[in-house]
Image: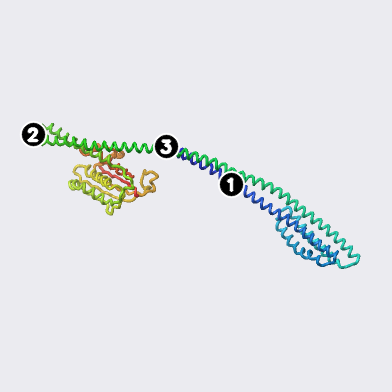
């Protein structure tokens, strides 16, 4: 992993980890804060419900006292209403306090006191209409007992309220604590957000400046490369046109010498003149080959066309027709060849050159044999292919012959220009053909490999990506 990528990954992971940590801290604080709010609401409900019970007991007692003094049944309405109401309120209070809460024992005692108070008031009402002294004494005693019960109930309720208020104080402190933590978390998010945004912006500016400089340098290099290519094309043009003419004249002169003055030349002179003609012809072919390679420019895939591979082989066979007949060569090519995308002229030159090599480099007295097989392959099935191409589809073309072959040690050099095999005669090859083939395949973003053994023939493997 490159250093810029590592720095980018670190710059991404650090704020991510911090934001996750702050988020968890904020979430935990919010949970605690919400819990504190709910508990505060609960304590307030307990306090209000306890106060309601005392208020209802007071209403019941006031109604009974009013009836005893005034003897008007209207005063008994709070008593009748309160008897029903107190039961509901006691149940509500009991439901608000969990069995494990410290107030539970007080709630149970409050229930007993409330019912004792009601029973006392019931007894007072029962004897209220009897006017004798004994019943008055009993009523006063019951009233005093009711007051005691009411005082105990008030104490219990005040104790419950005191405990709930203490809990409220604790919960308020917790609420303030967690509220401050939430605010701290929010400020941390804002702070780190500003810090990392500033760092990211700063890095973006630096990367943009670097990219701008890189693009400028790249444009300069492209311009230099285009200028260099133009110079090469001009040099190739000069080489092919201006050098060819003296070479043709040299060939013409040597031919005239041999035809017109052959009888005046001895055997050695005739041989040397023949060699001069041969080498001038070789130089001419080399110049032509160099010019061809120099003009094999890579064309953008957008400018490629679709055509049948069969058409390419047909034209290659037409070019080699005379040589095939002269050598009685056997050519076997797969039927139902697929369509391909590429540059037709370059691919035709590719297979014309491969076919010419197979027809040329054959053991003396042997009949050339060429077999062409075509199939589809996945990138993962091709050894030594870069990882980026493993998922791509390729058109595999196998071009095999039974020619002279070459040592496997020479496999890497065979595609280099002017590389000739040791067993090839100096007038048989120029060392340009396979270099030309490699450039054509590279122009199509493909791969070309040669496998051979001396005397066992050669297999040229071509892998062209299917677009």
Foreground: disc 3 or disc 2:
3
Mark 3 vs 1: CB contact within 8 A: no
**Residue receiving disc 1:** 24
| Residue under the point 52% across and 39% down | 199
Residue farthest right in this picture? 133
Instruction: Sort mark 3 into few (<14), some (14-19) or many (20+) by Cα contacts within 10 Å.
Output: few
- Residue 42 image position (x, y, % from top left): 69, 54
- Residue 462 image position (x, y, % from top left): 31, 46
Foreground: disc 3 or disc 1:
3
Quick one: SS at disc 3?
helix
Compare marks 3 and 2 and give the one earlier in the sequence: 3
**Residue receiving disc 3:** 213
Q: Is residue 77 above or below residue 395?
A: below
Instruction: Sort mark 2 into few (<14), some (14-19) or many (20+) by Cα contacts within 10 Å.
Output: few
Query: In the drawing, does residue 33 fall left or right of residue 280?
Result: right
- In the picture, the disc for residue 263 is 2
């Amino acid at each position: 992993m490159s250093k810029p990528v590592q720095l980018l990954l670190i710059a991404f992971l650090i704020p991510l980890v911090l934001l996750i940590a702050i988020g968890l801290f904020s979430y935990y604080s919010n949970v605690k804060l919400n819990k504190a709010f709910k508990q505060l609401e609960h304590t307030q409900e307990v306090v209000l419900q306890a106060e309601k019970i005392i208020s209802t007991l007071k209403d019941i007692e006031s109604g009974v006292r009013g009836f005893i003094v005034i003897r008007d049944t209207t005063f008994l309405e709070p008593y009748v209403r309160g008897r029903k109401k107190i039961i509901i309120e006691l149940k509500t209070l009991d439901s608000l306090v969990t069995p494990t809460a410290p107030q539970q024992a007080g709630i149970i005692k409050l229930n007993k006191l409330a019912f004792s108070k009601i029973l006392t008031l019931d007894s007072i009402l029962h004897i209220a209409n009897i006017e004798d002294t004994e019943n008055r004494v009993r009523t006063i005693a019951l009233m005093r007992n009711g007051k005691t019960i009411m005082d105990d109930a008030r104490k219990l309720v005040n104790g419950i309220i005191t405990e709930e208020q203490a809990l409220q104080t604790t919960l308020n402190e917790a609420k303030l604590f967690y509220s401050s933590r939430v605010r701290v978390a929010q400020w941390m998010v804002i702070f780190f957000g500003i810090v990392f945004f500033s760092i990211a912006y700063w890095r973006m500016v630096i990367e943009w400046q670097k990219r701008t400089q890189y693009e400028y340098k790249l444009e300069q290099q492209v311009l230099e490369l285009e200028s260099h290519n133009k110079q090469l094309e001009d040099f190739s043009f000069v080489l092919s046109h201006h050098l060819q003419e003296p070479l043709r004249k040299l060939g013409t002169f040597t031919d005239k010498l041999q035809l017109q003055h052959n009888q005046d030349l001895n055997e050695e002179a005739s041989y040397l003149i023949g060699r001069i003609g041969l080498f001038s012809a070789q130089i001419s072919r080399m110049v032509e080959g160099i010019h061809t390679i120099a003009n094999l420019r890579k064309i953008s895939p957008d400018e490629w066309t679709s055509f049948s591979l069969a058409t390419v082989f047909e034209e290659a066979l037409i070019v080699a027709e005379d040589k095939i007949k002269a050598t009685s060569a056997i050519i076997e090519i797969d039927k139902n060849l697929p369509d391909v995308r590429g540059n037709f002229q370059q691919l035709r030159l590719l297979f014309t050159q491969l076919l010419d090599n197979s027809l040329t480099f054959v053991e003396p007295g042997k009949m050339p044999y060429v077999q062409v097989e075509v199939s589809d392959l996945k990138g993962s099935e091709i050894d030594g292919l870069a990882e980026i191409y493993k998922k791509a589809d390729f058109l595999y073309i196998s071009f095999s012959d039974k020619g002279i072959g070459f040592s496997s040690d020479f496999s890497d050099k065979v595609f280099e220009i002017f590389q000739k095999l040791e067993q090839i005669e100096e007038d048989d090859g120029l060392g340009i053909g396979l270099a030309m083939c490699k450039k054509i395949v590279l122009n199509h973003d493909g791969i070309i490999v040669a496998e051979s053994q001396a005397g066992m023939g050669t297999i040229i493997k071509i892998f062209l990506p299917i677009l």
